Amino acid sequence: MSGDLKNKNILISGASIAGPALAYWLNHYGFNVTVVERAAELRKGGYRIDLRGVATEVAGRMGILDQVKELNTAMRGSSMITAAGKRYVDLNDPNIFGMRQDTDVEIMRGELSGILYNETKDQTEYIFNNSITSITQTHEHVTVSFKQGEPRIFDLIVAADGLRSNVRELAFEKENTTIKHLGYYVATFTIPNHFDLDHWELSYPALNKLVNIYSTGENQEAKALFMFAAPATDHGHRNTAQQKQMVIDQFKDEGLAISQILDAIHDTPDFYFDAISQVKMNSLSSGRVVLLGDAGYCPSPASGQGSSLALVGAYVLAGELAAASGDHRRAFNNYESQMRWFVRANQQLGITVLKEMVSKSNTQLWFQTTMLRILVKLPWKEKIFKRFLKEMQQTVDEAANAIELRDYARYTRHTIKSDPV
């Protein structure tokens, strides 16, 4: 255990995955943590997310892995469909169509967020329905103004508020930040379960676009994901009507089944839309402010690694602050040094997966659909699929394990339960 901690009072912006995960570790190392969240309550929606490689090890060290596994989506299979909704390929091995190892776990984003919140709410001050409006730094502290309430003084600020980070915009020079558009947009929302899906997903590939629908049980509701190629445009980050119209314009002529799915976009309670982008920073810190998760190194949804990066980043940042007894300069430098290759590998993964995920030509689309039709009719198709996907699986595994976790246990000031991985 280290001596007296410097900079004990830490403000985290964002209560999704990265923020509460960081709060968990900071609490155990003896820091005082406040989390401010723009939303009025914990966000319960969202799509499914993967925890892979070292991220599952972090979840085990937190003692939440068993809870995560209990809420595993337990998807049983996947089918390819035509525009009319007819299934023409069935895949019954989730490890194949999801490119997962046995230790990887898939869970709904809102479920993981809820676990992390419940693990931290008794030791953490959570402030909902509020946001940071200004940051003033000195050598000793940071004065923060909020949309609601009086200004407050903290020792450090952590931006865990996502791709469109408000704190990053307030505290970092614009030339330090690059948001790289990867050429696609994505929308997700809840739809009626017209296909009677039960732990099953459907995929509809088309030229420069795709649709994915799934349900994690015999529910009346399902989730839909629409992805499409489009150049970067000022789509209005908070203009939901304009975003919905972009999706409708892209998919309205794709056939009856797709139109039926698309009809739900008007009344869905949890519409999400954004560009598929990556965040690249010259530095992850600016004085007493540091970036965590998507705010600092979003790998894009195509990588499937955003939540894993958030969990691992939270573990490393908190551990380095504890190891440095709160000396933020030393801790921030070590955090960035440790995360550098892990971030780079997973951002490259996002680019690689995106190239394979969406067909860029009619020839590529023909091969994607026709080859699958042929392969599923062949004997030993599972072995053929595994061999066919072996290179991509290796790329995913290497990125998911591209960091060696340090052991910060000796700096712990409170008991940490842990689960076997």
Image (spheres, rainbow, N blue to C red):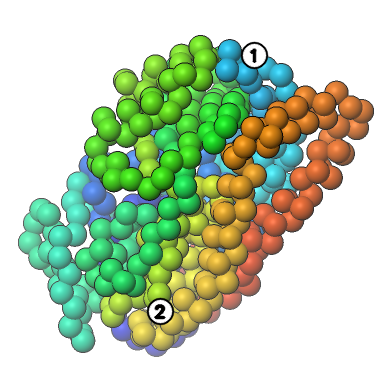
Q: Which of marks 2 and 1 is in front?
A: 1
Q: Measured from the top left, where is residue 83 in percent x and y?
A: 57, 17
Which residue is pictured at 66% across the width and 24% down the height? Answer: 80
- In the foreground, 192 or 299: 299
Instruction: Give, as a three-letter code, the residue at label 1.
Output: Lys
With respect to residue 384, does 18 lie above or below?
below
Q: Position of residue 205 (x, y in %)?
A: 60, 29
Q: Which mark is first along the chain, 1 or 2? A: 1
For numbered disc 1, what is the local secondary structure? loop
Q: How far apart are marks 2 and 1 (CA)?
A: 53 Å
Three-letter amino acid code at disc 2?
Phe
Camera-side residue of 187 and 72 = 187
Q: Residue at x 53, y 73 (%)?
A: 340
On the question of residue 262 being in view, the answer is yes
Judged left or right of residue 239, residue 86 is right
- Which quadrant of the figure has residue 404? bottom right
Q: What element carries label 2?
A: helix
For the C terminus, give its image quadrant. Answer: bottom right
Q: Are circles 2 and 1 on residues that touch, CB within 8 Å?
A: no
Task: Please give the residue where the numbered disc 2 appears in the rendered image.
Answer: 332
| Depth check, front residue: 181 or 50 | 181
Figure label count:
2
Residue position for label 1: 86
The answer, for residue 32, to whether it is visible in the render is no
Q: Which residue is drawn at 25% across and 58% down?
A: 166
Across and down, in percent, residue 239 comes to: 24, 37
Q: Would you call the spot at circle 2 few (<14 residues within 10 Å), some (14-19), or many (20 or more)?
A: many
Name the residue: 47% across, 32% down: 226
